[in-house]
Image: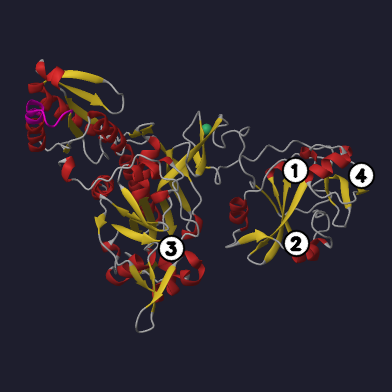
């Protein structure tokens, strides 16, 4: 492609409304323009990067035995009512009504559509397993779209859905996708990890997220330095501590203490001269409208996702003042587990605590000398807290590292959540009617491109890895009005194009400095510079965008060298 003919509006200044580096660089490199909040147009350079990712995804999905379909973006509400998500999904679901007053939504995801399709076409176990995928535009009406295409409302996504006859089959399908995702993100050139994750609102039993490691990532993750354990921070497990034998003779007597206006852990510690490790926080939650008290040591934080999973409820929120006074008979700030009128669950951090301080369930009172077993009835001890740097690996006890990441892919075991709700059944070998076991597997295409830029950039611009680079090579004759330079550039350009190398010829009548700046900004991996001095010696220069290394090579060898470099780089990522 000739630069002079390209629709490539690069910008010198950093756009003021862009917060993250990928968004800034995509705007500056003329890849992207905003149409409305969280809705973007891809320009040619941006769309080429998108297509590169799509093609890698397509190749690996096909290789893993999945088949491509293309489902409608507009979906009838009836299907969403069948699955129960029409009401549950809330405002992120963009709803619309047609001229016949029928309700529709723009698909934020496609479980309903695919389940209905497969339900109607598949009757027996002989037609299973199946894995169907598409690359499609989705819409989620995020309240606060930001970070460019990293968290936009309209976005391209690859979503795949597997259907199996039993758990063993579903496990095989899941594993195939897990392996395919590893290949995809390796081919994209990422430093990434597959981490154990919470299944979130899609529901289901088991999932992994694929996280690109980047300091700017929205997600916190942990990984073990000794074994393969890696998890999203919100999911990271904490091992149950061994219970140390207790000598009940060491239990202090319960003592009610007058603590006027002392409510927070800090205030309690100061007033009673104790450490947060000797105090229990009692937090009252509403779990599906039922109050539950969660106990945790004063220096720890409750992880609401763990609490929700432990209680097996659909929704969880901190209780209001009314509920608190109903179950504790006291205002906020004095809740405690002794005599409380609701179920009590406790974090593992309580297991070996002795003679601790709790709220008195009475205004302006706390109680000292409390002990579980003797004074408090606990329904369950569970892992309810957020992992800290001082914690160790739940699998091997090794040291845990914290990192930030950008989620680019997610694989879920859905089980029978949708097949039961929508009655997707098949006849098994023995003639029995059974529900299909499902899995679903997503990759954010635009987000993958953005994550790639987050991981590969410097002060001058983007540093594309070869597999996603919109073009492999840019040829820069330093002066287009010099006939010798111009002819050599045209010649190399033609030869590389013939060999299938994706190449830009910067044929603009611009100063060399301007051309170099643009080439660096748009991040093309290899630049061939053609200048008068080196050409007089029969040479041109190849510059690596990544390492900055420049080497002078004879003109007649440049074509072979470039072909070899590009192929080597693409092959290296293929592994
Ligand atoms: Zn470990």
Q: Which residue is mark 3?
A: 416
Q: Give the left or right position of residue 176, taking residue 327 as reference.
A: left
Q: Secondary structure at mark 3?
A: loop
Of the residues under marks 1 and 4, which one precedes in the sequence? 4
Of the residues under marks 4 and 3, which one precedes in the sequence? 4
* Position above or below: 211 against 392: below
Of the residues under marks 3 and 1, which one precedes in the sequence? 1
Q: Quadrant of residue 169?
A: bottom left
| Badge 1 density bin: few <14, some 14–19, many ≥20, Cα 10 Å | many
* Position above or below: 93 against 473: below
Q: CA distance from mark 2 to mark 1?
A: 21 Å
Quadrant into which the N terminus falls: top left
Q: Which residue is mark 1?
A: 298
Q: Which residue is mark 2?
A: 342
Residue shown at 29%/32% (left/top)? Answer: 517
Q: CA distance from mark 1 to mark 4?
A: 21 Å
Q: Give the left or right position of residue 162, taking residue 388 as reference.
A: left
Please provide percent x and percent y for residue 281.
Answer: 76, 48
């Amino acid at each position: 492609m000739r630069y002079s003919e390209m629709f490539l509006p690069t910008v010198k200044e950093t756009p003021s409304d862009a917060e993250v580096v990928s968004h800034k660089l995509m705007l500056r490199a003329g890849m992207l323009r905003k149409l409305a909040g969280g809705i973007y147009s891809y320009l040619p350079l941006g769309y080429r990067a998108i297509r590169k990712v799509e093609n890698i995804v397509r190749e690996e999905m096909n290789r893993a035995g999945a088949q491509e379909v293309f489902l409608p973006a507009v979906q009838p509400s009836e299907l969403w009512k069948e699955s129960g998500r029409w009401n549950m999904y809330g405002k992120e679901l963009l709803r619309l009504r047609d001229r016949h007053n029928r309700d529709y939504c723009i698909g934020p995801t496609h479980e309903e559509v695919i389940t209905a399709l497969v339900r109607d076409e598949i009757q027996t176990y002989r037609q299973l397993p199946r894995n169907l995928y598409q690359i499609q535009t989705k819409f989620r009406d995020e309240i606060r779209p930001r970070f460019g295409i990293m968290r936009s409302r309209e976005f391209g996504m690859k979503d795949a859905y597997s259907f199996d006859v039993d758990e063993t089959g579903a496990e095989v399908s899941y594993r195939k996708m897990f392996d395919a995702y590893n290949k995809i993100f390796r081919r994209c050139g990422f430093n990434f990890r597959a981490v154990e994750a919470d299944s979130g609102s899609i529901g289901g039993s088991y999932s992994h997220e694929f996280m690109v490691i980047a300091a700017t990532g929205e997600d916190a993750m942990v990984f073990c330095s000794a074994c393969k354990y890696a998890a999203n921070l919100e999911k990271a497990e904490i091992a149950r501590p061994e219970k140390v034998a207790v000598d009940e003779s060491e239990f202090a007597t319960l003592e009610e203490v007058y603590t006027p206006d002392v409510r927070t852990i800090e205030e309690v510690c100061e007033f009673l001269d104790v450490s947060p490790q000797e105090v229990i926080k009692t937090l009252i939650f509403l779990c599906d409208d039922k109050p539950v008290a969660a106990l945790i040591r004063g220096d720890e934080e409750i992880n609401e996702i763990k609490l929700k999973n432990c209680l097996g409820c659909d929704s969880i929120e901190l209780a209001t003042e009314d509920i608190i006074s109903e179950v504790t008979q006291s205002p906020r700030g004095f809740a405690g587990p002794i005599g409380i009128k609701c179920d009590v669950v406790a974090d593992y951090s309580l297991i070996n605590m002795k003679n601790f301080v709790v709220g008195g369930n009475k205004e302006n009172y706390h109680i000292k000398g409390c002990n579980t077993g003797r004074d408090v009835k606990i329904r369950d001890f569970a892992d309810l807290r957020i992992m800290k740097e001082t914690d160790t690996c739940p699998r091997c006890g090794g040291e845990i590292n914290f990192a930030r990441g950008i989620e680019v892919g997610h694989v879920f075991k859905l089980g029978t959540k949708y097949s039961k709700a929508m009655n997707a059944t098949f006849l098994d070998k023995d003639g029995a009617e059974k529900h299909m076991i499902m899995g679903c597997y997503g990759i954010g295409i635009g987000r993958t491109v953005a994550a790639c830029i987050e991981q590969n950039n410097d002060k001058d611009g983007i540093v594309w890895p070869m597999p996603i680079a919109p073009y492999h090579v840019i040829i820069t004759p330093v002066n287009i009005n010099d006939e010798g330079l111009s002819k050599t550039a045209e010649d190399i350009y033609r030869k590389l194009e013939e060999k299938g190398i994706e190449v830009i010829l910067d044929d603009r009548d611009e100063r060399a400095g301007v051309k170099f700046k643009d080439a660096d900004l748009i991040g093309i991996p290899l630049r061939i510079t053609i200048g008068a001095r080196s050409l007089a010696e029969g040479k041109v220069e190849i510059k690596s965008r990544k390492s900055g290394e420049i080497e002078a090579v004879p003109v007649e060898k440049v074509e072979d060298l470039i072909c070899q470099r590009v192929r080597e780089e693409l092959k290296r990522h293929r592994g």
